[in-house]
Amino acid sequence: MLLLLLALPVIAENYPHQSNLLWVTTPDHPDWIYKTGEKAIVTVAVYEYGILLDDEVISYEIGQDCLDPDAKGSIKLKGGKAEIEIGTMDKPGFRDCRMSIESGGRTYKHHIKVGFSPDEIQPYTQMPQDFKTFWKNAMKEQAQCPAIPEVKYIEEYSSDKVACYLVKLQCFKPGQFVYGYLTKPRKEGKYPIVVSPPGAGIKPMNPLKTIFYAENGCIRFDMEIHGIDPSLDAETYKTISQAFGEHNANGYLASGIQDRETYYMKKVYLACVRVVDYLSTLPEWDGKNMIAQGASQGGALALILTGLDQRITACVANHPALSDMAGYAEVGRTGGYPHFGRKYKDIRLTANVIKTLSYYDVVNFARGITVPVFMTWGYNDDVCPPTTSYAVYNELTSPKEALITPVNEHWVSFDTRYDQLEWIKKQLK
């Protein structure tokens, strides 16, 4: 398998826009997968303006997925290529080779990860004995809080085929709200519903990005989870995000993390259920199909909602975040986004934090899923590493399907997004 991967100065992004350099990295196993104990070798070639470079030096560092390097070195391109020994692993996981080359006064970077028996990866996260009881009681408590829907027609995002509405719902406790854009086919009929929680951060929303769902016969609800009107301008959102969306102790993903009852994400998870409460009342719903779909944090929330709410009939999740989050507590183990104990500032994986995370980790919700799941992830992802996607996927016992795209970092193609809609259609009852 020949994969054309690009490099960008300073940033190790494999597909930058209009770079001078083109990296070609080819593992000696075409699927990028090895058994534990097998040694991996990657052949590297670098092109500048389409011309194969020779006699240039590549520097590299090799280590486990999202962990510090355990090997460093350099190698010279000979005959236009070089072979780098990635090594092996005695436990299931991934190794990452990070390379750089100097050209024209700039540094170009690139990386590639290969897996070792990834189908055998097991999560660090343990299931609390009262996990189901905790969430059952939380949902009962929310049920006493009325949704009080506020629905506003949005002409800007509507067309002759699709009607768009901005919806505001009360959730969790009185005075707590979430928003979302609801898009529906204008043609009279009964339709399946796709509920889509958002990726991480605090940012504006544009329902036109996913309007093709409604154009293809689905009702869709794109969620906002913080109670901030998604129609606010981008500059206002930027100011809010700087105060509450950054990766530090004041960021929402760390807020209240010392206790399961005070953790910010409790409201978020219950808000997903509240959205299903509302959507299930729509007269246009077909009454049979309620699909959860999302990417990154949204992929995590889609899986979580599927584990929480039996009304969900299928799930699509891209590279889920919030997965095996406490993994870094074990030396030599990769943890999931937001990388508490490693990249996330000021939050250590204490016993209290690990206990809280066990009630909020995707792994434990995945263990209870009974409906079909479609997951996709890439090996070169450093945001939601492949180790933790496998940790989730391997725990699923329901019907499941994986689209594994080794070359991908934290993205999926537009083709894949449309393919996922086709997968959803095949699951309809």
Image (tube, rainbow, N blue to C red):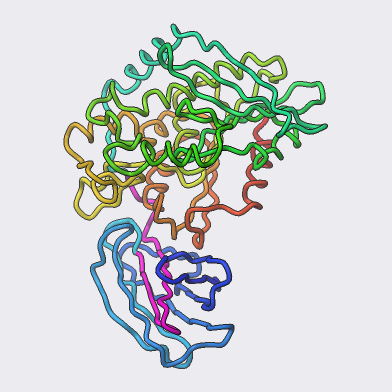
Residue 428 quadrant? top right
Q: Does the image show residue 361? A: yes
Point 64% across, 27% down: residue: 182
Position of the C terminus, as image quadrant, is top right
| Above or below 49: residue 95 | above
Q: Please name the predominant secondary structure of the magenta segment in the image.
A: strand
Residue 156 in the figure: left or right of residue 376: right
Position of the N terminus, as image quadrant, is bottom right
| Front residue (pair 85, 37) | 85
What percent of the width, then of the height, locates residue 359? 31, 28
Point 26% across, 23% down: residue: 129
What percent of the width, then of the height, locates residue 307? 45, 28
Q: What residue range appears in magenta?
A: 96-122
Residue 379 in the figure: left or right of residue 429: left
What count of labels does the image hold? 0
Residue 10 quadrant? bottom left
Point 48% across, 74% down: residue: 26
| Front residue (pair 364, 165) | 165
What percent of the width, then of the height, locates residue 334? 29, 52
Check residue 344 for magenta coloring: no
What percent of the width, then of the height, locates residue 35? 37, 63
Check residue 121 for magenta coloring: yes
Residue 167 quadrant? top right
Point 75% across, 36% down: residue: 216
| Front residue (pair 284, 108) | 108
